[in-house]
Amino acid sequence: MIDKVKVLLEQENHNGRITIETIIDPEEMELYIDEKQISQVLINLGKNAAQSRGKQENGRIKITTATGTKGKKYIEVWDNGPGIPPELIDEIFVPFFTTKNSGTGIGLSLSRQIMHLHGGNLKVHSVQSEYTSFELSF
């Protein structure tokens, strides 16, 4: 699934300014999910990450899978974009909130709802001018 998402994101990376990396650990990790829905969440997060870079060079997006210390499985989408301002961090999951001129503001709220329907969660951590990461925990 992660490889398919990477291919789709790379197809939209026409300008080549963004490197997309995947780190799958463990290789045989199994998740009991609706693959289409979770793929949609990952594509949404990847597109947001790419758009946050604008026309800046040396963009990086990492999609990592791992198992935490208590056996919880997660997928993280990380980017080295400008980060999310602290005053907006609590707003980004609110339906119809957007900072984009052409955005609808439903992507992150829908993504979080999909994660809740899977018994999981979607969390964000961002440091302005450094990075943003979204963690899908199952």
Image (cartoon, rainbow, N blue to C red):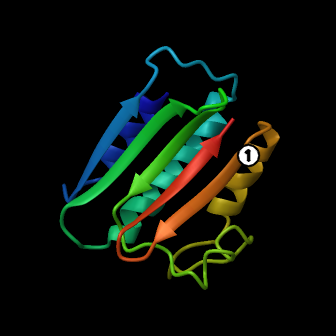
17 vs 72: above or below: below
Front one among 2 and 65: 65
Q: Residue furthest bottom?
A: 87
Residue type at mark 1 is: Ile
> Residue 111 placed where, x, y %?
67, 52
Label 1: how many Cα within 10 Å (few below 14, some 14–19, many 20+): some
31 vs 94: above or below: above
Q: Residue at x 30, y 45 (%)?
A: 20
Q: Residue at x 64, y 72 (%)?
A: 92
> Residue 51 placed where, x, y %?
39, 67
> Residue 55 placed where, x, y %?
24, 73
> Residue 19 placed where, x, y %?
24, 49
Q: Is residue 20 left or right of residue 4?
A: left
Q: Which residue is mark 1?
A: 114
Q: Residue at x 53, y 45 (%)?
A: 42
Which image quarter holds the C terminus? top right
Q: Residue at x 47, y 62 (%)?
A: 48
At numbered mark 1, what does the secondary structure look like: helix, strand or loop?
Answer: helix
Count numbered badges in the picture.
1
Q: Residue furthest front?
A: 69
Front one among 7 and 132: 132
Q: Is residue 22 left or right of residue 26?
A: left
44 vs 63: above or below: below
